[in-house]
Amino acid sequence: MDFAICHFCGDEYNKKRQDLGYRSCLECGQKHAQKEKDYKAKCTAPAYNKGAYQYVSTKAQVVGIFKCGSTK
């Protein structure tokens, strides 16, 4: 069975995972996914009054959100 080498920890992982485009083992991939999840959880805001929370990824979106109810 062929193995690939994880770019983060150097451990071997299944070649089929690499063929799918992953560059890390499951453990390192899980750590990275958890960090990304925690970061994105902090970047959500309601887009309009009584609206659902949405992911905010740029400064332009932040400006647009806070202009929404402005009458000036």
Image: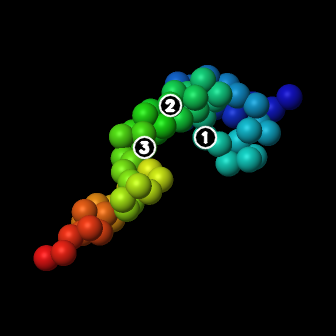
Q: Secondary structure at mark 1?
A: loop
> Whole-percent x and y of residue 3?
75, 31
Asked whether the viewer can see residue 6, the reply is no
Callout 3–callout 2 Cβ contact below 8 Å: no
In the rendered image, the residue lying farthest to the right is 1
Give the farthest residue toward the left.
72
Residue beneath label 1, please?
23
Picture coordinates of residue 44, whole percent (x, y): 39, 48
Q: In terms of sequence position, does the residue under pointer 3 or pointer 1 come before the other?
A: 1
Task: List the residue tagged with mark 3.
Answer: 40
Q: Earlier in the sequence, mark 3 or mark 2?
A: 2
Is residue 57 or residue 68 the one in the foreground?
68
Q: Are marks 2 and 1 in contact (CB under 8 Å)?
A: no
The residue tagged with tag 3: helix, strand or loop? helix
- Kindly identify which numbered label has been placed on residue 61: none
Residue at left offset 36%, top offset 47%: 43
Q: Callout 1 environment at 10 Å: few (<14), some (14 to 19), or many (20+)?
A: some
Q: CA distance from mark 2 to mark 1?
A: 16 Å
Assign the N terminus to one quadrant of the image.
top right
Give the amino acid at mark 2: Gln
Task: Tell me how far mark 3 sits from mark 1, CA to CA.
Answer: 22 Å
Q: Position of residue 54 (x, y in %)?
A: 45, 54
| Amino acid type of the residue that numbered disc 3 sits on in the rendered structure | Lys
Above or below, comparing residue 8 to residue 20 in the picture: above
Q: In the picture provided, is 32 more to the left or to the right than 61?
A: right
Q: Nearer the viewer, residue 19 or 56?
A: 56
Q: Is residue 69 left or right of residue 57?
A: left
Find disc 2 in the rendering and name its residue. 34
**Image check: 56 left or right of 23?**
left
**In the picture shown, does residue 45 fall above or below 36?**
below
Q: Which-is-in-front pick, marks 3 and 1?
A: 3
* Left or right: where 40 falls relative to 68: right
